[in-house]
Image (cartoon, coloured by chain):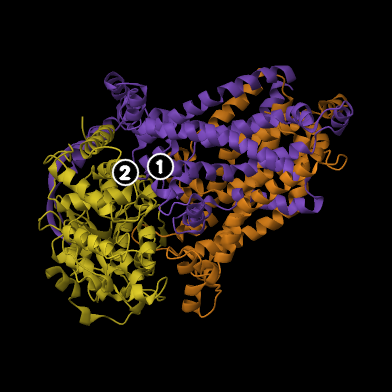
Amino acid sequence: MKLKKILMTGSFLVAASASTAFAADCSIESGRLSIVGNEFPAIQTVARNAQECEGLTEAKANLTADHQKINLAGMQGNPAEYTTAIVANSSIVALINEDVIRPLDDLVAAYGQDIPRNQLITINGEIMAVAFMANAQHLVYRKDILEQIGVEPPKTYEEMLAAAEKIRAEGILEHPLGGPYMAGWNLAQEFINMYIGHGGEFYEPGTATVSINNEAGVATLEMLKALSEYMNPDFLTHDSNGTSAEWEAGNVALMNMWGSRTGVLMDAEGSTPEVYENTMVGAPMTVGGNDTPASTLWWDGWTVAKNISDEDAEATFKAMKHGISPAILNDETMGQAVWMIEGYQPAAVNEGVFSAISMQTTPYPMLPHHGLLHTALGDNIADFLQGKESAEQTLSDIEAAYTTAAREKGFIN
Amino acid sequence: MKHSAFFWFTLPSAIAMLLFIFFPIVSVVVQSLYVAHEQVIVEVENCGPFGCTTATAIDQEATAALREEQPLGRFAGLEIYTDRNHLAVDEFGQLWAQSTGVGDFIGRLMNLPFYKAIGFTLTYTFIVTPLTIILGFIIAVAVNSAARALRGPMIFFSLLPMIVTPLVGSLILFWMVDARGILGTALRALADDPSLSVKADTGLMWIMLMVYGVWHSAPFAFIVYYAGLQTVNTDTLEAARIDGASRWQQIRHVVIPHLLPLTTFIALIQLMDNFRVFEPIVSFNASAHATSLSWAIYNDLGGETQQLSSAAATSVLTILGVAILLSPVLIRTWRDYGKTA
Amino acid sequence: MASQAQKRPVLLQALMIAVLVIWMIAAAFPFLWTLWGSFKVEGDFFSLADWTNVLTGDMTTRETGDAFTTQGYAGAWIQEEFWRAAWNSTLVCLFVVTISLTLGTLGGYALARSTYRYAFWFLLVALIFRAMPPITLVSGYLPVFFEWNVWGYLPTAIIVLVAINQPFTLWMLHSFFKNIPQDLDESAMVDGCTRFQAFRHVIIPVMWPGVITTGLFSFLLAYNDFAVTAMILDKENQTMIPKIASFLGTTQTKGNVMFAVAAVVSTTAPLFLLIMFFQRQIVSGLTAGAVKG
């Protein structure tokens, strides 16, 4: 629980939030701030606060769901259009690979001594980003239904399957399990969770050569298939939205879901009291008798562009630092994310993410070539889950698709 | 028309197309011939809020030199076109050798991403295009026979499938055809099968995508035909009637020939648009069941790591595909052009 | 057509009416369903528990105290300032249509009047240009636009949309001009007009119907475009469709789908007026154009 303590430290220091709507003093003399990032509320809060800094010669933010398609191009020019990109641990690698973001060691030394160490993301000893929020997938369950069948919230996927069988056998729900299993990015993410849970290694150590066609890979696919047998037959078209809708309709009793999506499942909107009052979150589950949870940890953080003047970089750094300072937390912003900011007071709904952290869940792999594997996984797993081919065939298809893509991108010769 | 007049009249259009379509196509073709330069990988330690891990990263210094040397990457010729994620020439040969029969061969071929995509793309194109044309024609004839006062609103309602943005239109249809949605429930009742789910079955998903495709593009065919019907020569029809031609004969020998040039135009545009089918696959979350060439491009560009060269190669293959597909229509137009000019 | 002059057999008449009724339901029902649903909360309109909730409005009553709510509209137009996007879209549509038609009429006219083979090749190449998937084009533009500092602005999006739509516009207008008798402008030229004067004084007055029809398609393209506008417009210059997309949420966060639904419904109303206003011209336009392959 060390991190939780760190995260909670200073919760008594919550300053009265005077940040919104007032210009803030961030000791910036001049310089440009131009943010690109995703558009969910927590990022909007950060961007809004950063833009309020006094002294910026230009302050703008372009927050869009398509940020990953434009941030690279927008930072490759000289000077770069964007002085900072808000990224996650999966998307930072695209920027590092093309060498468009700068190491922050100097800036942190000069102006960022008060940023808690654990928020600094270092790659090869250089600080490349400053994280401000965390996310993870974990168990969400219906208390009433588990009580009805007399089962404790499952701690492993095997227990989850047993509980699902019991719920179905007692005729409570036909499809008691749920999960974002939509073919593509979502399904690949489930594979990555489960493969890590089985203790699998994605690559031969120190290389970009993939190796997932092994026992762990087969066990992972078998487990995904076993789970899918208890899901709505449409599971391959259900993303987070679809799965949440199923949950709110009361059709699902157990699922592995993003921490950031659980808040809206527990509020009074879109559902009946029977469902939302009984919606509980649990820790991420383990699988196959291993200790590592079958989940991944995610952070969102900001970076500073390389192709900009030192003056702009300094201004951007100071403004973004203000954007994630404890002063931004107030009643409205507190519930927007699992903040890593001092003064953050987690609600019950955030227990799942904190459990994931304390159980030492593996962070999502921050590797230069992992995005290619993620795409290859997403394109091929559905064939196996539909019963079109064997697990070995699917795994070898994935390896072949990845290897071809990695060769095109120069990671393998 | 004189050469110089032609030049000045078409210049603005030509410049626009040259700058925004031709040059990008050239750069895409060039891009598809290059692969990224070798990435020098080193083992590093990464630290973050969740502790430290050993990982790999690109050695920027070593890579920077290579990047400087070869800004476009390494010249690969047609390597990308022939690799497994595109035409898969080697795999194609192997499968041919291994397969026990044509059916078996096609089955295995569909496991390769390019052939899977082209399989659906061609099926979609050749089913949706004729159906769109036929449906558009029937609606046009029907609307044309309706009372004059009703035609205005009917035109508007007929255009709705084309007007409402597919982004939301298909989202709403997606929920309507859900097993528990209004259309899904109706289908279950009709088929008398309580476990029927359109989204869970590849065959039904293909049918749904095609029904959506016809529904979405029928208005285009409709409006063009409807306008064409306004100009059918009434004298000719009158003469045919006096000669004792039946209703069907009138349509067959007067109306249809009159609408033939329109049909060519619709077919040309529809073949091209259907070959590039993309939006329904994304909107209906159907990629587990059906993929297309345009979807493959989107998938390459939209992943965590953008695969520009791969997307470029697929784009060039798409253009070639369209050219082949349109060639019969174009050859016909070429002959006509000589005559009318 | 012969409809008035010749009485139809009852069976055929019934068949026609049946076709019309079925098509009208198929075309309009999803929209009418959406129109109705836009006054409900998400829990009702997108309910997986029971689709009849949309009709009864259970959840809407529980959450808002009334069976109908305008929350979606208020959220989209007031809270999310959808009018900004609507204004941007208006600008984009206006300019795309005007510029497309200006370039297209000039080019289309020349293509229709030229007797040389290269005019055909011009059309052919334009058609092949249209085969390029827009998404690839756009990803090619990005680095260049950022480099030139023109990324994110409305004029950039307008020019790109005009260019991408030019092949279609040219084909359509070329076919249209082919049906305007050559004698018209040629006799003007015999009288001493230059080619351009002939175009200006003789052709322009008679070309409007066809131009309006082509304009409708240009308009719909600009109005419904997502691939281009989502990628090359800055947030503050966003048009309607990307704005609607932004209501839909992402993998890790829930969106506000009812805002999107309300926005779509409310932007369809002006189109209804537009089409009612232009429907006569649309039809007479294509009539005169009698588009040829």
In the image, residue B326 sits, relative to residue C283, either above or below, namely above
Q: Amino acid at mark 2?
A: Gln
Disc 2 chain ID = A
Which residue appears at 70% of the width and 28% of the height?
B261
Q: Position of residue C246 (x, y in %)?
A: 45, 59
Q: Colour of chain B?
A: purple
In the image, residue B208 sits, relative to residue B319, either above or below, namely below
Secondary structure beneath dot 2 equals loop
Figure quadrant of residue C73? bottom right
Residue carrying label 1: B202
Secondary structure beneath dot 1 equals helix
Badge number at residue A386: 2
Q: Colour of chain C?
A: orange
Q: Position of residue C106 (x, y in %)?
A: 70, 34
Disc 1 chain ID = B
Q: Position of residue A186 (x, y in %)?
A: 31, 51
Q: Residues within 10 Å of mark 2 (few under 14, many from 20)?
A: some
Judge by depth and name the residue closer to the eye, B193 or B210: B193
Count of labels in the image: 2
Which residue appears at 58% of the width and 53% of the height?
B164
Figure quadrant of residue A292? bottom left
Q: Where is the C terminus of chain A found, in terms of image quarters?
A: top left
Q: Amino acid at mark 1?
A: Thr
- CB under 8 Å between discs 2 and 1: yes
Q: Is residue A175 left or right of residue C31?
A: left
Q: Is residue A291 left or right of residue A345?
A: left
Judge by depth and name the residue closer to the eye, A258 or A233: A233
Q: What chain is the yellow one?
A: A
In the image, residue A377 sits, relative to residue A334, either above or below, namely above
Judge by depth and name the residue closer to the eye, A403 or B136: B136
